[in-house]
Every structure is written in C-alpha cells, then in structure tokens.
Image (tube, helix red, strand yellow):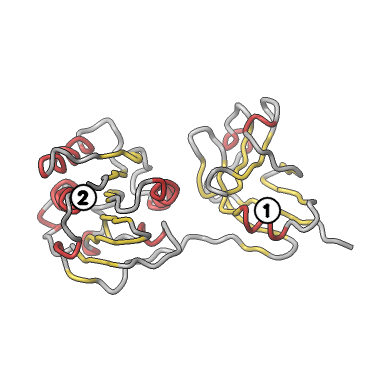
Amino acid sequence: MALITFLSDFGLSDHYVASVKAKMLSVNPALNIVDISHQIAPYDIAHASFVLNSAFRDFPKGTVHLVSVNTTSNLSDGFIAVKLEEHIFLGANNGLLSMISEHEPGIIVNIGGFHARNSNFPTRDILAPIAAKVASGQAIHDFGGPLPSIRRMMPRQFKATKKQISGYVLRVDNYGNLITNIRQDVFNTLNKNGEFNIVFGRESLQTISTNYDDVVNGECFALFNSLGLLEIGISQGNGSELLGLHYDSPVYVEFKQEG
C-alpha cells in the first residue's frame, strides 16, 4: 500500500488538517499518512513548491502526495492528478505542480468536474477521498479524463557566465538561513581556479564551509546544503534579520579570471 503525504497552508490551530485526515481514513483506516508541512505561508505557492520539491523524492516511488495550498482561490482552474517522476500528486491546477520538477508529467488527469463549487472545503470533500482511493490501489484515470497540460508558473532562474553567477534567495528557513537558487554543480563547473567572491548585501565571503559549525558563533558562513543549493547564514544567529536579506534578495558569486 502506498504512502500518502499531506502538504497544506492550513496551519495547526484549526480543525482543517484533522478533518482531511479523517476523510482519508474513513475510506481506508489502514492508510499511512505522513505530514510534510502545514505551516506553508497562506496562499504561498512559491513556498509550497520549494518544500515539496525538496522533500518528495525522499519518499518511495508510488507515494501519493496530497497538496492543498491556495486551493479555493481559483476554482475555475479545477483539480488535477499528476504522475511525475513515478510519484502521484493531487492538488489544484494553480501552477504549483509545474514548479517542483524539470521533468514533464507522464500522466495528467482533470478531476475538476467533481463540482468544486459545491464545496467550500474541496481538499476534504474532493481531493482527500481520491487520494485515499488511489493509495489503496485505484488508478488516477478512474477519477477524470486526460488533460493535455497543466497550468504553468515559471520560477526565476539564476544567470551564469564565466565571470559570475547571479542568483537570489528562494527561501528563508526556520533558522533564518538564506537558501539560494545557486546550484553546486554550476558553481563547480565555473570555479576553475578556486578563487571566488560570494556577495550578499553588504557582506562577502571567499570560502565555502563544509558544515554549519565550521565558523565561530556570530560569523557568516556559506555552504552547499543537502539540496545542493548555496546557503548563507550566521552561525547561531538569524542571518535574514542580521544581514537584512529576505526572499528574492540578490546573491552573486564572482569568479577571478585567469591571466
């Protein structure tokens, strides 16, 4: 039996998460439901896509991912079930699922015909029962017809030349660390002679740490995290607050040219 993961912007102070889980368990009490997060900022598709992209590949292939972020703002877009990288995703057709992978979905099913406007809680009433049934063995084709494409949103990309990588902060984590969109493989390709300058706000660094505790408390660090992304912070401090940087702040890596 496949797992179900659950990601939402519901928070934890209300009944919403429990109600959705109760609906899934009423279909199949043996389901294994794993929470990814329910602390996504309300309606924040960028936040949700980052968290989902960072986590879903850690689950076994065949896992069903129920995604409920900004699900009631654009009911006309309907709901979809998508097979992507051997995982199944169910959610609103609001662009979020287009931002979690560079691969094209293998299957897209339109489940928007389940009368979304008849419910003010579509995650519980529409998506949860389908997620439970798919995790219990039914095919996503059973819940709608094929859709040629999903609604797309294009995340901002870094820009790279031989002299510089120009990126930005795409997430400030719970510790105040700044996760950028600058990838380690790109850095390694362009870092020909080992001399570089990482520029962020009024600060700069010329070294890449291996671990978070490579610098003394209160000092800035830069490292490539478990996602292979450049991360900047202050040891034992809130980098976002102390550096005055936040989501979308620019970060540059400048390379010294030979000769």
Image check: 46 left or right of 244?
A: left
Viewer-side label of 2, 1: 2
Q: Residues within 10 Å of mark 2 (few under 14, many from 20)?
A: many
Res 19 quadrant in image: top left
Image check: 126 left or right of 98?
A: left
Q: Position of residue 37 (x, y in %)?
A: 35, 39
* Picture residue at 11% right of the left edge, 44% below the top: 27
Looking at the rendered structure, the kind of residue marked 2 is Ala
- The residue furthest front is 1
Looking at the rendered structure, the kind of residue marked 1 is Tyr
* Picture residue at 34% right of the left edge, 59% below the top: 86
Mark 2 and mark 1 residues within 8 Å of each other at the beta carbon: no
* Picture residue at 29% right of the left edge, 43% below the top: 6
Q: Position of residue 161 (x, y in %)?
A: 70, 65
As drawn, 215 above or below 204:
above
Image check: 89 left or right of 237?
A: left
Q: Position of residue 143 (x, y in %)?
A: 15, 62
Query: What element does badge 2 sit on?
Result: helix
Query: What element does badge 1 sit on?
Result: strand
Q: Nearer the viewer, residue 171 or 257?
A: 257
> Which numbered disc, 2 or 1, marks the residue that appears first in the sequence?
2
Q: Nearer the viewer, residue 44 or 89?
A: 89
Q: Which residue is mark 1?
A: 252
Q: Position of residue 258 (x, y in %)?
A: 85, 61
- How far is disc 2 from disc 1 in space, using C-alphas? 44 Å
**Which quadrant, please, contains the C terminus?**
bottom right
Q: Nearer the viewer, residue 38 or 223?
A: 223
Residue 39: numbered disc: none
Q: Which residue is mark 2?
A: 135
